[in-house]
Image (cartoon, rainbow, N blue to C red):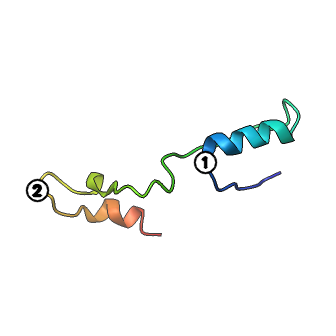
Amino acid sequence: MKQLYFGDCLDVLKDLHRQYPKGLIDLVYIDPPFNSKRDYSVIFEDIEMTDVKSQKQAFAD
């Protein structure tokens, strides 16, 4: 199958449940929060509020 879905996780899971017989799907990987328009960059600053270059570089691609 190897497909990537873009959308609300609950809606996509409901659609998958309707489309495919039970036991056919081996893995569903959900990585929320996705497209939430929130700023999570706080975790990439140190205690002095300066950028932590190694962490930012890891997510630059």
Q: Residue at x 31, y 62 (%)?
A: 54
Q: Is residue 34 above or below residue 27?
A: below
Q: Is residue 27 visible?
A: no
Residue 4: quadrant of the picture: bottom right
Gap in Å between the C-alphas at discs 1 and 2?
A: 36 Å
Front residue of this view, candidates 38 and 24? 38
Q: Would you call the spot at circle 2 few (<14 residues within 10 Å), some (14-19), or many (20 or more)?
A: few
Residue at left 54%, top 46%?
31
Q: Amino acid at mark 2?
A: Glu
Residue at label 1?
A: 8
**Residue 9, quarter of picture:** top right
Q: Position of residue 38 (x, y in %)?
A: 38, 55
Residue 25 shown left or right of residue 61 in the figure? right
Residue that carries the numbered disc 2 in the rendered image:
48
Give me the residue at 26% from left, 54% from top.
42
Percent from the top left, x then y, of residue 51? Answer: 22, 64
Image quadrant where residue 22 sits: top right
The outermost residue toward the top is 22
Mark closer to the observer (1, 2) = 1
Disc 1 residue type (three-letter) = Asp
In this view, the residue farthest toward the bottom is 61
Task: Please state which of residues 19 and 54 is positioned toward the viewer in this rendering.
Answer: 19
